[in-house]
Image: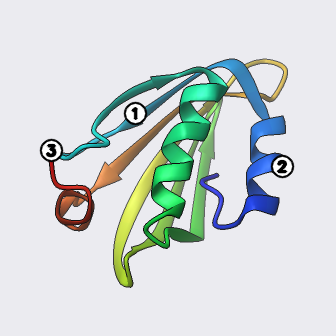
Amino acid sequence: MRPSATADAAGAMANMDDSIVWTSRGDNALTGTYNGKEEVGGLWAQLAGKGFSTAPHDFIAEGDKVIVLTTATIAGESVESADVLTYNAEGKLIAFDTLGDPTNANRVFAK
């Protein structure tokens, strides 16, 4: 549920719990944990500045977790990734963690 355009961002934010915990892996300027919608929005703004987009293509759901296999593009370079989404009983997203090769993000968002 990483939006590729502003219109998607509003819809995605509406489906998030206010206490969302978003984990960005790698060794770059964006690596870390973002808490709450405001911090996540700030992360998304930085990603959007580098032409970020995502194309989910496979979904695996079990209980409160959904694994989304996606093709993520940053600065014109695409990589495959797996996102782990966790939902609460109300169906709101409460945790998001991207697992995959961070090489492109490490290059684009070098410390």
Q: Which mark is residue 27?
A: 3
Whole-angstrom CA distance, mark 2 to mark 1, is: 20 Å
Name the residue rendered at 40%, 33% in the picture.
23
Residue placed under numbered mark 1 in the picture? 23
SS at badge 2? helix
Above or below, 49 relative to 16: below
* Nearest-to-viewer mark from 1 and 3: 3
Disc 3 marks a residue whose amino acid type is Asp
Name the residue rendered at 22%, 60% in the picture.
101
Q: Which mark is residue 49?
A: none
Disc 2 marks a residue whose amino acid type is Gly
Query: Dot 1 surroundings within 10 Å: few (below 14), some, or many (20 or more)?
Result: some
Query: Mark 1 or mark 2, which is nearer the start of the sequence?
Result: 2
Name the residue rendered at 83%, 49% in the picture.
11
Query: Dot 3 surroundings within 10 Å: few (below 14), some, or many (20 or more)?
Result: some
SS at badge 3? loop
Q: Is residue 96 visible?
A: yes
Left-right relation of 10 to 3: right
Q: Are marks 2 and 1 in contact (CB under 8 Å)?
A: no
SS at badge 1? strand
Left-right relation of 82 to 55: left
Q: Position of residue 72 (x, y in %)?
A: 44, 70
Q: Position of residue 75 (x, y in %)?
A: 37, 77
Disc 1 marks a residue whose amino acid type is Thr
Residue placed under numbered mark 2 in the picture? 11
Query: Dot 2 surroundings within 10 Å: few (below 14), some, or many (20 or more)?
Result: few
Q: Position of residue 16 (x, y in %)?
A: 74, 31
